[in-house]
Amino acid sequence: MNSLIIVFISFFLFALGYRFYSKYILIKIFNLNDKNITPAHKQRDELDFVPSKKHILFGHHFTSIAGAAPIIGPCIAVYWGWLPAILWIVIGTVFMGAVHDFGALVLSLKEKGRSIADISSNVINKRVRVMFLIFVMSLTWLVLAVFANAISILFSKFPTAVLPINIEILIAIIMGYIIYKKNINSFFPSLAALIILYIFVWIGSTNPIKLESIGIVSENVQHSWIIILFFYSAIASLLPVWILLQPRDYINSHQLIVGLILIFSSIIIIQPEVIAPALTNIDSGPPIIPFLFVTIACGAISGFHGLVSSGTTSKQINHMTDSRMIGYGATLGEGTLAIAATIAAIAGLSFVTTECYPWSCNFAAAKQGALPTFINGSSALLEKIGLSVHIAQTLIVVLVVSFAATTLDSATRIQRYIITEFGEAINFNLIKNKFIATLISIIPAYLIASNDNLRNDLWTTFGSSNQMLASLTLMVLSIYLFKKKKNILPFAIPMLIVMLITFSALTIKLNSSPNTFILIINSVLIFLFLWMIVEGFIHCAKVINKRK
């Protein structure tokens, strides 16, 4: 099958979703207009609450949610064949993931920029708020560990990416100063920043930076990168958003657009044939239902996106109606990245000599080889349109690391907010301090990321708990709209589907994982999940009784 057909159908369905479904939710359910002032203006503090131009904030939000997850997940999921992976990415993104992200963003806008966990206190009760915060903290530590691990692996295997990534940080700081302190239009600085970044991609492709050159032995390189990454993310999360996060993410959004244009241009020009089977491995490895869905994870729907929407993005929205493009549109962008990752795996690998394709080896090997699958498959596509081997590979690795790093420091910032909220919820002033909260954010994540015994089970647990959080966010949204006497079906139906999927996945993992830590974290998450569901249904029953 020609991969171009898959791309065309997917894009067409994404366009329909944005044109009609997002507009229906904007007007008919949320009734949004620009008469109401956003929290960014009402609570402006130049640190977290900062009104931002729509396209700059789109870039910040897009790169914060994109990360490496929509790349890793689909490249593992093609273990079961290309058809179920593509179907879930498209259907899940249009009707579940984008709706979830849009809803979380709008609800936070209506509730003074508060996080979903905090809002659950008003929507349901204070007990749910505390449980929600504990659940979110547990998930965010997993997110930080997963992405720190992914970046450390890439820096260890592809040291050519180290120079351009670090130069990008410096460029972003300069760009932030120019835009926000000198009030210069963002377009030309961002264009210059992107050109400089690509110059250093070219320089870095032949000038790798290895930690071994400063005396660190090979066995400790990955661990050293994990320490460096958490040190960086702690500092970045404490800086005002305009200094580093926004400008760097704006550069990254342009970088992603260029990267996707190159990948999809190569698909249009080359039209590579799909070499993966449509459906396979149904009787081997983990059961396709529910593990396909939690494996693709952020490629379709992600609870972490709700944290970004309500944790940072809602505090920067300039106009209420901007939330449609940023909330719903950015998720479609992530779905596009997931499609690109899938095509790289199922068609790009046709130009690569390998002993094991994701669908022809065991599931453990498919997980371990997810990043190399995307890097090798997509860089092979770029080579076919004229890029050299070294530049193509470095370009793709820089793209992956850039978004993983964005998720890393955005998640650290969000975790700081959550821990501070938790301190308020339990009246414990010490952890309300932003420096203490930042330390609590990174230390447990570092301990998880640096534990070699956890790495094999970490992705599935992250995927399951991540989508479990998405279902809880959808539950809060459904109850909120139910109390407002609005149509809850666009949120309640995805909620029920994702609840069943994630509960099944975590239950199976609970019975099969040999790792004690994974067993404990799965048990805690399931307990909190069930308790919050019960609290939600009890609250709805009370609302119904009051209406009688």
Image (spheres, rainbow, N blue to C red):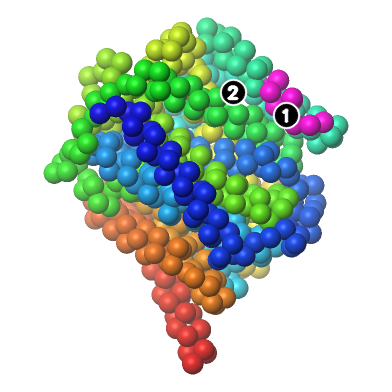
Between 548 and 225, the residue placed more toward the observer is 548
Residue found at the very far right of the displayed protein: 182
On screen, residue 156 above or below 235: above
Q: Is residue 46 visible?
A: yes
Q: What's the amino acid at mark 2?
A: Ile
Residue 58 in the image: state x and y as whole percent. 63, 41
Which residue was labeled with disc 1? 187
On screen, residue 23 above or below 391: below
Residue 166 in the image: state x and y as whole percent. 62, 22
Residue 353 magenta? no
Q: Is residue 456 visible?
A: no
Residue shown at 32%/21% (left/top)?
A: 272
In this rendering, the count of numbered labels is 2
User: For this view, does 452 lie left or right of residue 215?
Assistant: left
On screen, residue 80 above or below 130: above
In this picture, which residue range is highlighted in magenta? 184-193
By secondary structure, the bulk of the magenta-drawn segment is best described as: helix
Residue shown at 37%/49% (left/top)?
A: 91
Mark 1 or mark 2: which is in front? Answer: 1
Residue found at the very far left of the displayed protein: 283
User: For this view, does 254 lie left or right of residue 527?
Assistant: right
Give the mark nearest the N terminus, 1 or 2: 2
Q: CA distance from mark 1 to mark 2?
A: 21 Å
Mark 1 residue crowding within 10 angstroms, few (<14) / some (14–19) / many (20+): few
Q: Quadrant of residue 283?
A: top left
Q: What's the amino acid at mark 1?
A: Phe
Between 261 and 443, the residue placed more toward the observer is 261
Q: Mark 1 and 2 residues: CB-CB less than 8 Å, in contact?
A: no
Which residue was labeled with disc 2? 165
Mark 2 residue crowding within 10 angstroms, few (<14) / some (14–19) / many (20+): many
Label 1 SS: helix
Label 2 SS: helix
